[in-house]
Amino acid sequence: MGTDALRMRGITKRFGRIPANDAVDFTVAKGEIHCLLGENGAGKTTLMKVLFGLHKKDAGEILLDGRPVEISSPGDAIAGGIGMVHQHFMLVGRLTVTENIIAGREPRSGFLLDYRRAREMVREISGRYGLKVDPDARVEEISVGQQQRVEILKALLREAELLIFDEPTAVLTPPEVQELFGVMRRLKASGKTMIFITHKLKETMEISDRVTILRDGRKVATVETARTTPARLAEMMVGREVELRVARPEVTRGERILALKDLRVKGADGRYRLNGVNLEIHRGEILGIAGVEGNGQLELEEVVAGLLKPAQGRVWLGAEEITALDPGAIRARGVAYIPSDRLRRGLIGSFSAARNLILGSQRGRAFAPGGILRHRRIEEEARRLVADFDIRAASVHEPAAALSGGNQQKVVIARELSRRPELVVAAQPTRGVDVGAVEYIHRQLLKMRGEGKGVLLISAELDELRALSDRIAVLYEGRIVAEGPSGGFTEQELGLLMAGEGK
Amino acid sequence: MAEILTAIFNTSNLSATVRMATPIALAAMGGSFSERSGVINLGLEGMILSGAFAGVLGSYISGNPWLGVLLAVAAGGMMGLILAFFAVGLKADHVVSGVGLNIFALGLTTWLMQVIWKSRGTSEAVAGLKEVSLPLIRDVPVLGAILGTNSPLVYLMLILVFLGWAVLFRTPWGLRIRVVGEHPEAADTLGIKVHRIQYACVVLSGCLAGLGGAYLSLGQLNWFSMNMSAGRGYMALAANIFGQWNPLGGLLASFLFSFTDALQMRIQAAGIAWPNEVIQMLPYLLTVAVLAGAVIRSRPPAALGRHYEPGRNT
């Protein structure tokens, strides 16, 4: 593969006293697609932000094409031929595609910006790499997949030879992922070098030439993709053997626990977010909701939790109608809620883990007899939950915001599942959670199912849905477009249904 | 009814509108630049006031009102630099910084006036700017009466507003300003220097507001009086919002504000048999109605009022 496009040697980056990168060596050969694999918090994004000049490194050196370089700002990185496709797109919604792409290197005629030439530049570069975009469309009006193309074009226009993709598939539908991989292969054919940051094993196996695994800020190994297996990669990522797919034992299906009848929810723009949804969940059953984000999942979880009142339709928990009840009353009737946005809905970041663990029970006799909080009791309960649910925190007094994503999620799950619920609403329960914690969360959900509870599992991860669910329903533009036993769908079918191209 | 219409569409009324709008439109354009780059500018009031003071001071020292105008622009820019230092450099709350600047400017100009002119109310009279008369426009009917003879700063304002619009929406620098105000992280990853642009924009807004202040003290009058900006900075900020953070929109909004004001005086003077209270209320009613409609639809720069620190937010 010739010379190395990039060598990073002994990169160390500390936040406070904690090293996010600890003497990491990372080498990328010219023209390869190199996966940077690791759990959340392993230091992948930190390493790449150091490379792109968004973080200052504390030690180490960077060589591009064999030459040592000093990168202290994104401007330096761009000048060195590095482009980054960020996980959270760096795009201005109200500006056009062209404006977003050319900002910072605008073609001029005199003092003025030459819009005609700018548009031609965008057309030329998008034609050359087969990345179709409408140069005059406003970015906020195009799809997420198209927005990502704009991000890639931004890097290409700046003559990037080394492209960093930061978790690019997180926001895409399965067909869009395939399209992205097609683009990456074309870029590779035209001689570009790519770094692909991910924690998804399947994608790593599919697209990469080599893989470097990071764990706890250190490099574990660099291996050739062709000579490794997903199980081996997972083991290196987590540091122990991991069951990628937890077994789902037979459970007899019980009586109905949740029923949704003709649920309709209107959005602020007058369009229906949920448009006539009918669903049932029985005891001992996990119902998986598949769908690309923004197709009504958020509304669905919030309606069942009582946070959002439907414009039409009814919700039953067991034999009781709960449509009009407030969230507190619904919780009291045994609905556990693991919200998709744990930092907004699930936790109070500045509160200690202990207080977060008793949120919702703070008024009860258990922790506040006579209306006074009893800290000793709260702490005792928190210690018990931290042990039971394997939450890794320095102490129960640590603020929730300081915990890792996986441990934050465990706090939410511990609180919700320890209340002996009848129904669990789990929305994106493993998002931003490391592989080890994923396994744990999956076990907990299956345990609830085994105890005869109902579980509503809303997830964007097809593997997760297929592994855990007894039945799967696909949500597209607020409607259930398909429903059936989870074994009845192939992954391709689900992907197409999620994109609205069902059979 | 006919009386009212003549009172409204009356050339001296319209010419008063243009004159009264001048300082507001200049400061509103300053607001556009500052806020398009993401910095809330509540300090326009203090910047106008400093400009008005420095203008008179410059003319008093040199005897040349144009040197006064230059000093006014510099003083406004200095105020802008102070605001940028707090709001951008030290990441203080933008609103608090702006209000603080206004209080500082009021105290400083009042105190300096006492020191220099030994007076609490007004300064000595100095050489002001002479009105100019444009040969061709002067002879056009109606337009000539409105725009033919004015302070040179009125014409300068009209030119600057068009220039400002072109800079913001037609030049590379303008695009960069807008990217910074919408999404500073994106700007940073494009190699655009976020803080440098914000500093430049806030200083520029100070220069423009300072020029507006010079018009008050050297164009309309030829002396300085305590707190002579009298709320025009806040009106400018409203005009900027009403004008959708666009200098041209800000100019139109300034016209609307000053037109209703001129109108109210005119109707009172015309002796129409309505209660004075009702007449005085009209401009405010109109402004409230129009503003209410406009603000609902307005969309400020997405990162307005936010602090950006490279490598932290992303």
Image: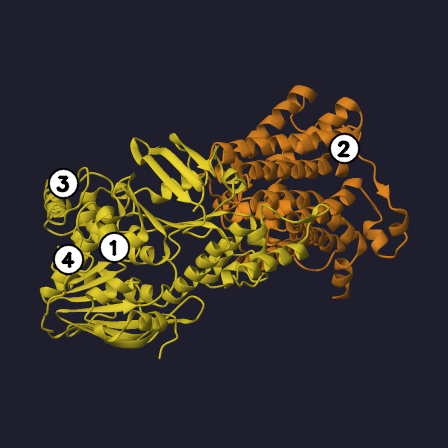
Whether pointer 3 and pointer 1 mark residues with C-beta atoms closer than 8 Å, the reply is no
- Label 4 crowding class (10 Å Cα cut-off): few <14, some 14-19, many 20+? some
Q: What letter labels the chain drawn in yellow?
A: A
Few, some or many residues within 10 Å of mark 2 (<14, 14–19, 20+) = many
Q: Quote the CA–CA distance across marks 1 and 4.
A: 27 Å
Q: Which residue is mark 1?
A: A229
Same chain, marks 1 and 4? yes
Q: Distance of mark 3 from mark 1, alpha carbons? A: 49 Å
Q: Amino acid at mark 2?
A: Asn
Quadrant placement of the C terminus of chain B: top left
User: Which residue, given by chain and number where applicable, does mark 2 sit on?
Assistant: B222
Residue designated by label 3: A375
Q: Secondary structure at mark 2?
A: loop
Q: Quadrant of the N terminus of chain B?
A: bottom right
Q: CA distance from mark 2 to mark 3?
A: 71 Å
Q: Specify the quadrant of the image occupied by residue B22.
A: top right
Are marks 2 and 3 in one subunit?
no
